[in-house]
Amino acid sequence: MKALKRTLVALAALTVASMTVATTAMAAEDGTDAATDAAAATDAATDAATDSATDAATDAATDAATTANADTPSEYKGDASAACKIAVGNVTAKAGETVSVDVVVSGGSVASTGITYVFDTALEFAGVNAGTLAPQKVAKAGKVSVTTASTENADGTIYSLSFTVPASAAAGTVYPITVTNVGSFADNTGAAVAHSVSSGSITVGGDVTTAAATTSSGAATTVKASKTTTKAGSSPATGEALPIAGAVAAIAVIGGVAYASRKNK
């Protein structure tokens, strides 16, 4: 009987011990899971912060690029292989001068056009003048859009743009006149005309210097007298010795008038 009791006590103790071990293991496992969950949460937060910072940086870079492109629009060149060509003139003007820049169509003809030009805001847009087409404009500082609508096709100088160069512009300064868009370019049937485009410019030149008539300063030029023989009736050239009876003379030119000085032998 005593042996049975001891066995039962031993079994009970073993059961308690087993339950304690199991409970401890479960607690440890729960702790590991909690730690894992916490680490995952940390990683998620880190990823979110990184993504947010990256997105912000990307957005800022995009905004900066957009602003830069707005300030420096890209040049439109059209189809380089097209037979029809739009050429904006390259001209030279003095500081303060108003100059015309022709827009020329060659290798084809058009009736309806819509072309946008940009230029340095230092240039003052002074208007658009009709050529083979009658233009309409919408202008603001540094930009002008010109349209034409005709029932007849045309080529050559379709119109010209006028600009006033700043009075303070330094010689050698170049102001590009850049085509940034051709919204329409069609013939009188409405069919689109393939085209290439070359932009133009205004280059500031120096003042034009012209040759002016000059007069003598009045200083006398004296030529050493020498004895010579001159045919009667001949006229001496400036600086030649002039024979006078019994004397020699020197020619002096003062204020454009020849004078003779006499010296007796």
Image (spheres, rainbow, N blue to C red):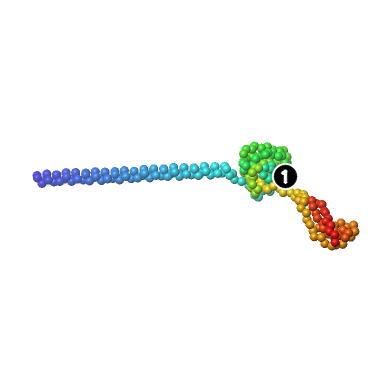
Give the residue at mark 1. Answer: 156
- The residue depicted at 73 percent of the width and 40 percent of the height is 152
Q: Residue at x 42, y 45 (%)?
A: 50
Neighbor class of circle 1 (other Cα within 10 Å; few <14, some 14-19, many 20+) is some
Q: Is residue 198 above or below residue 225?
A: above
Q: Position of residue 131 (x, y in %)?
A: 72, 41
Does the rendering let one see residue 7? yes
Locate residue 205, reporting x and y percent: 67, 48
Q: Quadrant of the C terminus?
A: bottom right
Question: Is residue 78 among the parts visible in the rendering?
Answer: no
Location of residue 123 in the rendering, given as x and y in whole percent from the top left corner: 64, 42
In which quadrant is the N terminus drawn? top left
- Specify the quadrant of the image occupied by residue 143: top right
Residue visible at 28% across and 45% down in the picture: 29
Q: Amino acid at mark 1?
A: Gly
Answer with the quarter of the image where residue 239 lies: bottom right
Numbered-mark total: 1
**SS at mark 1 in the image:** strand
